[in-house]
Image (cartoon, grey):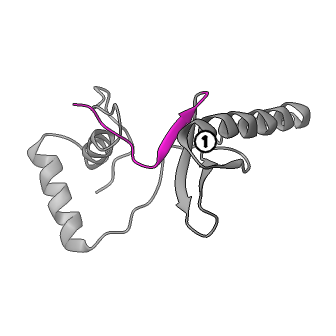
Amino acid sequence: MVHIMKNAMLINGYRAIIHFDPEIDMFRGEFIGLNGGADFYAQDIAGLKAEGAASLEVFLEMCREDGVEPRKQYSGKFNVRIPPDLHESVVAAAVAEGKSLNQWVADELRACIPGGKPESHAITGVRN
């Protein structure tokens, strides 16, 4: 199955989210997952790629000069608040598949992203 990520672009290994700004009649790109901000503007796809690469290079050069890791580090943990009835249903779905709640949620999230597929290793620290 081919997944298409809408409004996103991969530039030199870094993800950018793209939005159209009707006030200036241009597309705006913003890199995500960085330890700082890097954005860019263009009127078309080719321009987005060129401007994105230039903006990213400026950001990476600043990181090198300052000794900063350019990519944000994620812990692998986050809290989600959901209604109690949904919580109950999700736990039931996980148990029915013989999975922990964390493994089930991780597998479901993975299946929703481009190239995502369930991992074979278990996620620890489970608490329903």
Q: Is 46 displayed left or right of 127 in the figure? A: right
State the residue lying farthest toward the right.
65
Which image quadrant is residue 73 in?
Answer: top right
Q: Quadrant of the N terminus?
A: top left
| Residue 34, image x, y percentages | 67, 44
* Residue drawn 63% across the image and 40% down it: 47
Q: Is 72 displayed left or right of 44 in the figure? A: right
Q: Is 5 displayed left or right of 108 in the figure? A: right
Identify which residue, 24 or 37, lies in the foreground. 24
Which residues are the magenta region? 1-12
Q: Is residue 124 magenta?
A: no
* Residue drawn 33% across the image and 53% down it: 127
Q: Is 35 displayed left or right of 124 in the figure? A: right
Residue type, numbered disc 1: Leu
Identify which residue, 69 or 2, lies in the foreground. 2
Q: Is residue 8 magenta?
A: yes
Identify which residue, 23 or 88, lies in the foreground. 23
State the residue lying farthest toward the left.
96
Q: Which residue is mark 1?
A: 48
* Residue drawn 45% across the image and 49% down it: 7
